[in-house]
Image (cartoon, helix red, strand yellow):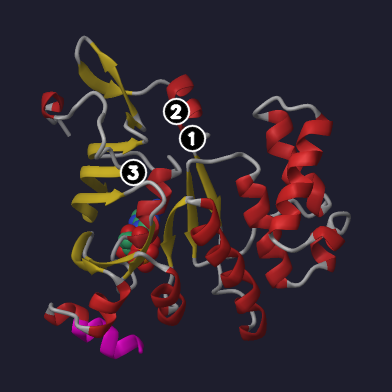
Amino acid sequence: MNEDMSKYPLRLEGSDKPMVRFMNVTKSYGDLVVLDSLDLDVAEGEMVTVIGPSGSGKTTVLRMLMTLETINGGVIYVDGEPLTHMEKNGVLVPADAKHMRRMRANIGMCFQHFNLFPHMTAIENCMEAPVHVLGLTRKEARERGLELLALVGLEEKVDEHPARLSGGQQQRVAIARALAMRPKVLLFDEVTSALDPEVIGEVTNVIRKLVSEHNLTMLMVTHQMGFAREISDRICLFYRGQIEEQGTPDELFGNPQRERTQQFLRAVT
Ligand code: ADP
């Protein structure tokens, strides 16, 4: 795509700088347009949840932020800096590997299936990236990991391997592991979907604590509407790679304005 990049700012500055900005972002696979000129902001400390029909582009938004997908148009900014672009002669050009690596360190992600390292204990899982990516000493990484495992209520389980933990406990280790990198933005992809109903509460309680006490910026995808309603500052309903409607949970669930939102909510609740 030959896009005129001169319309995009080299960086975002000032008091209204969002933590995350998707600006006119397009992503396609062949002829299939998955994100269609998407504009989406997440403010610092905000918890935004993306909901919508299957195939509407929700997971792609997270994968773009993880730089797991190339971008076909537009620019994504994280804390004011372009994520996959860099400045050259006063305009944005595709970023080099070094810039991408530095920017990727700002983003943490938790997945539906936890993706813990099975041969490592809970604390080793939390220490791995801080030691090998951030260059912390093992002692520093262990202290940080212990603090975070305590934050998620797992101080008793630090030396257990994932196979000996319940799904809810494994997901809490995964959250501690992501936090150990001190990300500016934390992404949650269906983090409660693989869990038994009786342990969902322990994971939502941890996320609620992160929202209320730690001022983290979070972007979540879920199909569990009750969870989304309870925990989010704002809900975005996606339809065909665009935001069809957005608002506070009460606005979106209580008084949806758009026909497609009403249809979607009727089908899932
Ligand atoms: P959602 O999370 O809303 O269900 P996704 O973001 O996962 O939607 O996917 C959006 C669309 O992109 C879907 O139609 C999906 O089949 C398609 N898609 C996702 N990844 C790929 C890929 N690697 N190659 C081709 N199509 C893909």
Q: Which residues are magenta?
A: 262-269
The label nearer to you, 1 versus 3, is: 3
Query: How far from the left and from the top, in percent, is residue 103?
Result: 45, 31
Mark 1: few/some/many CA within 10 Å (<14, 14-19, 20+):
some
* Label 2 CB sits under 8 Å from any ligand 1 atom: no
Give ligand 1's quarter of the image: bottom left
Decide: marks 2, 1 in contact (CB < 8 A)? yes
Relative depth, front residue between 212 and 13? 212
Q: Which residue is mark 2?
A: 100
Query: How far from the left and from the top, in percent, is residue 100?
Result: 44, 28
Real-space Cα separation, disc 1 to disc 3, in angstroms: 13 Å
Does residue 39 show up? yes
Q: Amino acid at mark 3?
A: Val
Q: Amino acid at mark 1?
A: Arg
Q: Is residue 46 left or right of residue 10?
A: right
Magenta stretch: includes residue 43: no
Q: Secondary structure at mark 1?
A: helix
Q: Is residue 223 left or right of residue 41?
A: right
Does residue 29 show up? no
Relative depth, front residue between 116 and 186? 186
Q: Tell me, for residue 20, which label it has, or none.
A: 3
Q: Which residue is mark 1?
A: 104
The label nearer to you, 2 versus 3, is: 3
